[in-house]
Image (cartoon, rainbow, N blue to C red):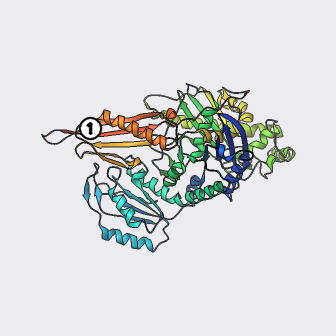
């Protein structure tokens, strides 16, 4: 049995799945003052009448790190950078405690200048006099040789519990993105560790020993231990849960499609190209910081079922903020959900209060109540349409990246829309009119995110570098640094990369028959050394493709593609 929990900005959803069948669901409002209680309350209800020994895994989609970053509720981080010779990097958004340290390695991992221990001792003394809670250590070419980062880590390890080393986060070379990624990882490490400790304690009290996995931004999951080392990987796991939920509930479509998750607070938008998700080629951006975190391409807008509807200067405004629940569900402010309740497309706990509020606003603006309700719903559809068009203009102006390959000269032209989220069924016919495309929603659309979290399988990416002149092979993500011979070649590297990434998948709890290992990139460059021969610089990127542990068994549906 698999337990899946998704915590959004408005509701927390939970599901229990056994042998591919959905056997229980729960939905509760999120307590914004106590996110942990919200998750645990959901989990506790799900486990009623369920033997804890029958639970094989618990998969979570959590906004804990995303919220910490966006709300600036993060730790004070001391950042130590070794930029080396060449371009003088300047970082102005890494907090108040940034130190530059001499010492460098070149692009092939060869030490150019050793560490200056006197400088390092001065940095340590300065940091000790400030309220620094975590460290981020990044050497420009540490993915080629992590020695300096490891030595700096050892120098500070007795002073700080949370220390992030840049080479452990990604094998990619992009230095500015690795700096930002390391900073954010250190900044949220304490928050994520506290969340994890509370969760483990609660599970232990209930006698639950099942492994826990966290959904990553790329649609795969990572075990809790791995997430503790790389909490930054869990940012934007909510949109990833949305995408995986749609893949679990809809039939595979080998066409271009737009995927929409409309929640209470935001709407997330994704795209399929020939049935394959569009991917972020270099890494996601959050809080204006460009990272190396792999992710399914998505755009979130401040528009949802509970978005605040009001009149400003005799004009109807919707969102981007959510002030509280819809009036129909006990809130005080009008929302699109209230408009759908008035139109008879949704039911609410307090429909009369909702209708009175809408009539009051209609009178203020000089419209009939039904006309106002239709106007609100139409504006939601129009905003989604405009956003989709803007996104497509941007995507189609550049090469399109999917999780499998780069597509040159390929324009995305959605043939249909797939939608999930609380208002999906009620909003579908109106959105069809706005988009002039068929709009489909599945059964269990209201808890699709939790289903996606539950069924997402573990995934991992590795970056291998082999240098036959130095006779060194490295895989930073796995902490592998080995000797190789002069005859090492691209074929051997690819075979070894597939072997390593498959083993990594097994350690994450993925059954062997569900491991889809593939080579994403592979290249071999000749390095001529005078008149004495040619050595090779070999680079290989391999991954386990994100996917589903299983498809959810079908239930009857009235409006499904």
* Residue 259 located left or right of residue 231: right
Residue 242 location, x and y as percent?
61, 40
Q: Residue furthest left?
A: 531
Of 507 and 339, nearer the camera is 507
Residue 356 appears in the rendering: yes
User: Which of the 4 image quadrants contains residue 163?
Assistant: bottom left
Q: Is residue 387 visible?
A: no
x%, y% of residue 145? 32, 52
Q: Where is residue 71 drawn, in percent x and y?
A: 59, 58
Residue drawn at point x = 51 percent, y = 32 percent = 513
At horizontal 54% and vertical 61% (from top left) the residue drawn is 190
Which quarter shows the N terminus? top right
**Residue 60 as seen in the image, left or right of residue 426:** left
Residue 159, relative to residue 35: is it above or below?
Answer: below
Quadrant showing the C terminus: top right
View extreme (right): residue? 352
Q: Residue at x 35, y 50 (%)?
A: 143
Relative horizontal placement of residue 351, taking residue 64 as reference (left or right): right
For disc 1, the marked residue is 488
Disc 1 crowd rating (10 Å Cα; few below 14, some 14-19, many 20+) is some
On the picture, is 385 further left or further right than 407? right
Q: Give the structural element (helix, strand or loop) at label 1.
A: loop
- Which of the pair 213/110 is nearer the observer? 213
The count of marks equals: 1
Q: Position of residue 173 (x, y in %)?
A: 36, 47
């Amino acid at each position: 049995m698999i337990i899946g929990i998704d915590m959004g900005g408005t509701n927390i959803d939970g599901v229990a799945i056994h042998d591919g069948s959905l056997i229980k669901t729960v939905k509760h409002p999120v307590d914004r003052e106590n996110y942990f209680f919200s998750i645990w309350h959901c989990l506790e209800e799900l486990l009623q009448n369920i033997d804890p020994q029958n639970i094989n895994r618990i998969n979570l989609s959590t906004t804990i790190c995303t919220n910490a970053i966006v709300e600036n509720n993060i730790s004070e981080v001391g950042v130590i950078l070794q930029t080396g010779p060449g371009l003088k990097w300047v970082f102005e958004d890494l907090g108040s405690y940034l130190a530059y340290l001499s010492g460098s390695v070149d692009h092939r991992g060869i030490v150019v200048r050793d560490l200056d221990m006197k400088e390092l001792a001065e940095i340590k003394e300065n940091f000790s006099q400030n309220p620094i809670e975590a460290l981020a250590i990044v050497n420009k070419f540490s993915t080629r040789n992590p020695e300096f980062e490891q030595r700096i880590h050892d120098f500070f390890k007795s002073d700080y519990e949370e220390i992030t080393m840049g080479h452990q986060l990604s094998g990619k070379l992009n230095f500015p993105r690795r700096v930002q990624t390391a900073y954010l990882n250190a900044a949220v490490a304490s928050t994520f560790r506290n969340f994890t400790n509370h969760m483990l304690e609660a599970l232990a009290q209930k006698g639950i020993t099942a492994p826990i996995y966290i959904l990553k931004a790329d649609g795969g999951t990572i075990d809790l231990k791995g997430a503790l080392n790389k909490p930054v990987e869990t940012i934007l796991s909510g949109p990833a849960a949305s995408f995986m939920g749609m893949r679990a509930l809809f039939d595979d479509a080998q066409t271009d499609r737009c995927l929409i998750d409309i929640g209470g607070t935001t709407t997330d938008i994704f795209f399929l190209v020939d049935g394959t998700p569009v991917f972020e080629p270099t890494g996601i951006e959050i809080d204006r910081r460009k990272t190396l975190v792999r992710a399914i391409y998505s755009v979130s807008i401040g528009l949802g079922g509970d978005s605040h509807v009001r009149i400003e200067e005799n004009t109807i405004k919707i969102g981007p903020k959510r002030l509280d629940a819809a009036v129909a569900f006990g809130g005080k402010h009008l929302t699109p959900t209230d408009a759908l309740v008035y139109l008879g497309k949704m039911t609410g706990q307090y429909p009369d209060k909702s209708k009175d509020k809408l009539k009051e606003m209609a009178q203020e603006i000089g419209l009939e109540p039904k006309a106002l309700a239709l106007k609100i719903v139409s504006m939601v559809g129009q905003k989604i349409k405009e956003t989709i068009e803007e996104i497509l203009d941007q995507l189609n102006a550049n090469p399109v990246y999917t999780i499998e390959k780069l597509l040159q000269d390929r324009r995305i032209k959605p043939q249909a829309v797939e939608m999930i989220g609380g208002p999906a069924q009620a909003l579908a016919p109106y959105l069809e009119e706005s988009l002039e495309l068929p709009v489909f929603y599945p059964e269990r659309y209201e808890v699709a995110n939790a289903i996606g979290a539950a069924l997402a399988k573990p995934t991992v990416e590795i970056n291998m570098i082999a240098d036959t002149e130095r006779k060194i092979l490295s895989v930073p993500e796995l902490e592998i640094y080995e000797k190789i011979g002069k005859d090492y070649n691209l074929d051997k590297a690819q075979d070894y990369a597939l072997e390593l990434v498959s083993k990594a998948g097994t350690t994450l709890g993925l059954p062997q028959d569900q491991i889809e290992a593939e080579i994403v990139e592979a290249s071999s460059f000749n390095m001529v050394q005078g008149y004495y021969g040619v050595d090779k610089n070999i680079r290989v990127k391999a991954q386990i493709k994100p996917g589903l542990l299983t498809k959810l068994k079908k239930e009857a549906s009235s409006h499904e593609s």
